[in-house]
Image (cartoon, rainbow, N blue to C red):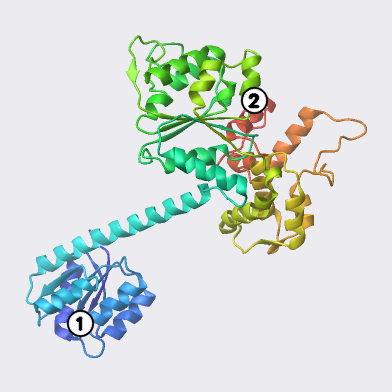
């Protein structure tokens, strides 16, 4: 492995020889004749590795080491000296040196040490980047809690996370049921395993069984290969069945058996396969009413709802609206490329709105504002600008006196969203507040083509 190397030595002849040996070994070498010169280069140039003599006129090598580590702890430092001692080696390693080499040393030994140091530095950078990404994702996924009701709910979710009990999360659409499901998985002993999410309402009825339990090649037309299914994909982790209330009755019976027996039978196969999953389900439907209406199995209801968690709608926790809006705005600021904040008037309007679409609606409004507002502040008028053109002050759509064509309106809104998003279907779907696959279905339905996610 090669890279950009900063070599510091106040001995001109040794600096030239060492630089030549490293350059012929494939390294790109920057030369410095003092610690001060080396740090000046380090501040201006891209450096993957520092190699410094410990005995320098002025700032010594250990001071250089400390300064480099203070600026960028991921850059490895190799300390070289002709005056080696155990004490100096120990001190260099304490300060974070990758290794300590005593003169005289062979050309190959130095090259090997440099390659190992570069590999270690690369791994450290990747590990730090991955850690930062994970922490950032955790921050984005964490629920915003600013009300007693949500404090109690999150505390309960964290307690049940340590168990294997099935959890049923209920609440209106857009209240954040998936966020709570992710919290349960993240806080559980299964956190290192997969979290597999299934939107039961989005799967065609004739494919639900295959999607959940898998199928073997040739089981039906189009089954060109074996597919494991979501249960097996979640083995060792958590299976989150969103909108479980939309499952067909025939599938509910098979789901109950899979949960109770902890095994599945792929479509087209007579072989049962064991599955170790923790089940978390969610629905916006009133399952008790669905049971009385004959649309949901009572035995399945009791099996999936050992621990029930109900998320109140956003209108019942108004103290969370502005903190949540600020949280979402913070996630959109990097894309907007400028600082953004709500005026007091805008914050008041947000808090007063009933939010029938709950958190999903709030997030969409904030995202539209971040895209459309040209200044640094979002005012009350900007909130209206971010909504649909037919919105009334009360937040509901006002039907024109002469009526309208709903399909025409839908097509017009889709085209507006695609125009604002530059043709990006994923972003257009977010602007419309619908899943991406639903938008794609609408595009095909209305023959609106030529849009991509690039």
Q: How far apart are marks 1 and 2 (CA)?
A: 76 Å
Q: How crowded is mark 2: few (under 14 residues within 10 Å), some or many (20 or more)?
A: few
- Does 292 sit above or below residue 312? above
Residue 132 placement (x, y as % from top left): 41, 56
Residue 339 placement (x, y as % from top left): 62, 64
The one nearer the camera, 204 or 176, is: 176
- Does 144 sit above or below residue 19? above
Locate the N terminus and report the quarter of the image it occupies: bottom left
Q: What element carries label 2?
A: loop
Q: Residue at horizontal 46%, vertical 11%?
A: 221
Locate the C terminus and report the quarter of the image it occupies: top right
Residue 33 placement (x, y as % from top left): 24, 85
Choose top left, top right, bottom left or bottom right for residue 272.
Answer: top left
Relative to 76, is 427 on the left or the right?
right
> Of the residues tagged 1 and 2, which is closer to the observer?
2
- Does 414 sit above or below residue 50? above
Q: What element carries label 1?
A: loop
Q: Residue at horizontal 56%, vertical 37%?
A: 177
Q: Residues within 10 Å of mark 1 (few under 14, many from 20)?
A: many
Mark 2 — residue?
Answer: 286
Q: Which mark is residue 376?
A: none
The reply to whether residue 71 is visible in this rendering is: yes
The one nearer the camera, 415 or 322, is: 322
Q: Which mark is residue 9?
A: 1
Sequence-wise, the earlier of marks 1 and 2 is 1
- Does 10 sit above or below residue 149? below
């Amino acid at each position: 492995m090669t890279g950009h190397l900063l070599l510091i030595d106040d001995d001109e002849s040794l600096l030239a020889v060492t630089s030549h040996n490293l350059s012929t070994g494939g390294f790109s070498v920057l030369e410095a004749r003092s610690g001060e010169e080396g740090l000046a280069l380090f501040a201006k140039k891209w450096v993957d590795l520092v190699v410094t003599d410990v005995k320098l006129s002025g700032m010594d090598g250990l001071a250089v080491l400390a300064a480099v580590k203070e600026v960028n702890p991921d850059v490895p430092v190799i300390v070289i000296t002709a005056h080696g001692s155990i004490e100096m080696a120990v001190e260099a390693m304490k300060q974070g040196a990758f290794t300590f080499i005593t003169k005289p040393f062979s050309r190959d030994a130095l090259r090997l040490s440099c390659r190992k140091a570069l590999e270690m530095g690369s791994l450290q950078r990747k590990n730090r980047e991955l850690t930062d990404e994970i922490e950032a994702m955790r921050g984005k996924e964490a629920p915003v809690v600013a009300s007693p009701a949500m404090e109690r709910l999150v505390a309960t979710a964290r307690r049940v996370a340590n168990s294997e009990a099935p959890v049923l999360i209920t609440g209106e659409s857009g209240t954040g049921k998936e966020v709570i499901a992710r919290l349960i998985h993240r806080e559980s002993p299964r956190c290192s395993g997969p979290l597999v999410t299934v939107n039961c309402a989005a799967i065609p009825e004739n494919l639900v069984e295959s999607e959940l339990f898998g199928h073997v090649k040739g089981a039906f037309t189009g089954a060109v290969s074996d597919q494991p299914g979501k249960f097996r994909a979640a083995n060792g982790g958590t299976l989150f069945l969103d909108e479980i209330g939309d499952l067909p009755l025939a599938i509910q019976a098979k789901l109950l058996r899979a949960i109770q027996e902890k095994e599945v039978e792929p479509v087209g196969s007579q072989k049962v396969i064991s599955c170790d999953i923790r089940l978390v389900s969610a629905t916006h439907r009133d399952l008790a009413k669905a049971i009385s209406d004959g649309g949901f199995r009572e035995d399945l209801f009791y099996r999936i709802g050992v621990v029930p968690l109900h998320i109140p709608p956003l209108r019942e926790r108004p103290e969370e609206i502005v903190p949540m809006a600020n949280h979402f705005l913070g996630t959109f600021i990097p894309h907007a490329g400028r600082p953004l904040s709500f005026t007091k008037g805008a914050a008041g309007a947000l808090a007063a709105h009933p939010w029938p679409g709950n958190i999903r609606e709030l997030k969409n409004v904030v995202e539209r504002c971040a895209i459309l507002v040209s200044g640094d502040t979002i005012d009350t008028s900007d909130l209206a600008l971010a909504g649909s053109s037919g919105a009334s002050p009360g937040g509901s759509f006002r039907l024109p006196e002469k009526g309208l064509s709903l399909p025409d309106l839908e097509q017009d809104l889709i085209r507006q969203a695609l125009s604002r998003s530059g043709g990006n279907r994923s972003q257009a779907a977010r602007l419309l507040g619908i899943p991406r696959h639903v938008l794609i279905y609408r595009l095909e339905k209305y023959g609106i083509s030529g849009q991509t996610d690039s």
